[in-house]
Amino acid sequence: MTTSQKVSILDFQKKKEAHQPITMLTAYDYPGAILVDEAGTDIVLVGDSLAMTILGHPDTVSVTMDEMIHHCKAVARGTKRAFMVGDMPFLSYQITPIEAVRNAGRFVKEAGMEAVKLEGGRDMAETVRAIVRAGIPVMGHLGLTPQTATKLGGYKVQGATADSANQMVDDALALQTAGCFAIVLEAVPAPVAKVITQKLAIPTIGIGAGPDCDGQVLVFHDILGLFDKFVPKFVKQYANLRQPMLTALETFCQEVASGRFPDAEHSFKMDESELARFQMLKAKDE
Ligand code: KIV
């Protein structure tokens, strides 16, 4: 059940324990945030996927801290209820823990986010610890980590072998010990995500990780059928809004070209006597 009460970090643990699925949706701007918030999502993630969905880059690596902050500020203005997480962009947290804390702090101080998300396993434990120590909650991200997709050999399912699945369990435990409050599992075989979810005290949030995670996340443009460059196997399009949007835009262009828009209904009238006076004033000038 959705209430109007603000979602807090404490709710996720309670939901895991009560076996109530957590929902997370991405949003990148003010109108998108209003929609996902009104839809009742528990978490709104300003994902670095905005590099692709909003900025038109071929991958997520090129989005900058300033661009992320700009979009997070807009999302914060539109979000009333959901818990807000800002995604740390590539190289904003990998260089040193000090730099990571400084950048995580910008998400909270400048952009109004309540937590940050970063990608990586045990190698990131020290960084997670430093950010959490500074008082900023951290969400982890394992499996297919798009910022390092090149290293992974592309956008592929992860943890598909027994050894790599085992490593992923250890990574998840390391992130939990470091202080993460939740972990995203992306493109992970369902049985592996199930084991990780059972082993962790903190919630898992799956995207292409099967039904046994504690929560599910999808990308705004994927759910609504607005991003059709490619549609991953795990994406369910709940609507195909691209076509009606395109039709509306095309119709505007056609109606302007043919003179059908604007019509009387969409134009302002003028009081008859004021119009007559205006015409007289104009006639005097000529
Ligand atoms: O950037 C993003 O949208 C994400 C989600 C896919 C979890 O990281």
Image (tube, rainbow, N blue to C red):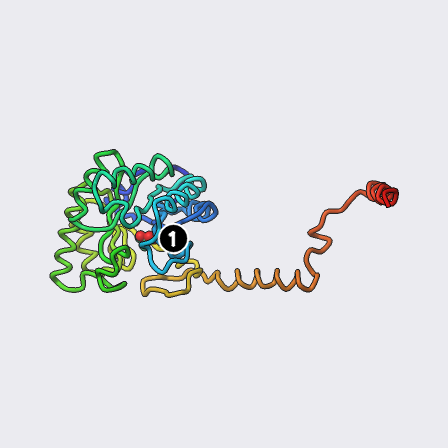
Mark 1 surroundings within 10 Å by alpha-carbon count, few (fewer than 14), some (14 through 19), many (20 or more): many
- Please provide percent x and percent y for residue 121: 18, 50
Asked whether, in this view, residue 24 is left or right of residue 39, the answer is left
Seen as rendered, the residue at the extreme front is 286
* Quadrant into which the N terminus falls: top left
Residue 80's quadrant in the figure? top left
Q: Can you tell me whether the CB of the residue at mark 1 lies under 8 Å from the nearest atom of ligand 1?
A: yes
> Mark 1 falls on what kind of element?
helix
Residue hosting label 1: 50
Tell me: residue 207, above or below residue 131.
below
Q: Amino acid at mark 1?
A: Leu
Residue at 38% x, 42% y is 69
Residue at 22% x, 57% y is 143
Tell me: residue 180, above or below residue 58.
above
- Please provide percent x and percent y for residue 182: 24, 45
- Please provide percent x and percent y for residue 70: 41, 43
Asked whether, in this view, residue 168 is left or right of residue 56, the answer is left
Residue 148's quadrant in the figure? bottom left
Asked whether, in this view, residue 270 is left or right of residue 78, the answer is right
Choose between 146 and 31: the one closer to the eye: 146
Residue at 66% x, 62% y is 255
